[in-house]
Each structure stands twice: as structure tokens, then as C-alpha cells.
């Protein structure tokens, strides 16, 4: 190396400025709940669609922001399950949105 320390220091260029932050709005994802109260009739097809795609009950519950019980109710459709699905759903939607 024939270059001196001073030559090396002067040959170093200033680092490039960091790129500006992007302020784009995130794309609206299909199936992801909004801040409005949803209708159960609109949510059930989403649950079934995710089930057909191979998602598990916990994955569906997390993605759609529902309780495990409600998603399982749609999956199993058992006469042994005695939950008031619509009532529970409406209560959870109010909590999710922040009304109660």
C-alpha cells in the first residue's frame, strides 16, 4: 500500500443521505377488520374462505379479530355447542371498535 493515511482519509467520500420516509397509506388488506361494526352474515363467508385455504381456527380468529369460540362455532357447527353466536359476536364487535 503506497497511499498514506492522509490520502486515504481524504479519498473517503461522505456517506449518502438516507432515503426519505415514505408516507404512503398501507393497502387495505382483504379480510382484515375495519374500525366499523361488521355484520355476522359478512364475516361467516370470510371464515369459510380462510378455512378452505387451509387456515386453522386460531389463525382465522387472529386475522379476523374474532374469538376462538365464534370461529369454532362456524367450523364445527355442532348441535352440542349452545352459544348465542350472534349475540356474542355483536358484543365482541362493540368491544373491538371501542363502543363498550
Image: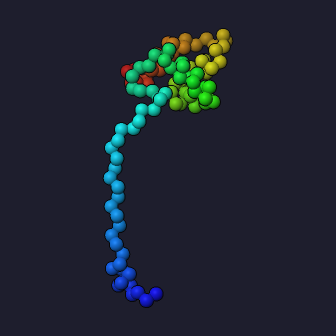
Question: Where is the C terminus found, in terms of image quarters?
Answer: top left
Q: Quadrant of residue 61?
A: top right
Q: Quadrant of residue 80?
A: top right
Q: Percent position (x, y) of residue 11? A: 35, 78
Q: Percent position (x, y) of residue 90? A: 46, 16
Number of dots carrying numbers: 0
Q: Nearer the viewer, residue 65 or 9?
A: 9
> In the image, 90: left or right of 60?
left
Residue 57 appearing in the image? no
Give the answer, above or below, for where 93 lies relative to 18. Answer: above
Q: Nearer the viewer, residue 80 or 10?
A: 10
> In the image, 62: left or right of 75?
left
Give the residue displayed 65% in from the left and 18% down from the top. Answer: 76
Q: Percent position (x, y) of residue 62? A: 53, 30
Give the residue displayed 33% in from the left and 44% down from the top. Answer: 23
Q: Percent position (x, y) of residue 51? A: 61, 25
Residue 7 appearing in the image? yes
Q: Nearer the viewer, residue 70 or 16?
A: 16
Give the residue displayed 41% in from the left and 87% down from the top. Answer: 3
Amino acid at each position: 500500500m503506497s497511499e498514506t493515511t492522509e490520502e486515504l482519509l481524504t479519498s473517503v467520500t461522505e456517506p449518502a443521505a438516507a432515503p426519505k420516509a415514505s408516507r404512503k397509506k398501507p393497502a387495505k388488506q382483504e379480510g382484515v377488520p375495519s374500525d366499523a361494526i361488521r355484520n355476522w352474515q359478512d364475516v361467516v363467508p370470510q371464515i369459510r374462505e380462510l378455512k378452505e385455504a387451509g387456515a386453522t381456527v386460531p389463525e382465522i380468529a387472529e386475522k379476523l379479530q374474532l374469538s376462538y369460540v365464534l370461529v369454532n362455532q362456524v367450523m364445527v357447527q355442532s348441535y352440542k355447542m349452545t352459544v348465542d353466536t350472534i349475540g356474542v359476536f355483536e358484543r365482541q364487535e362493540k368491544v373491538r371498535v371501542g363502543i363498550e
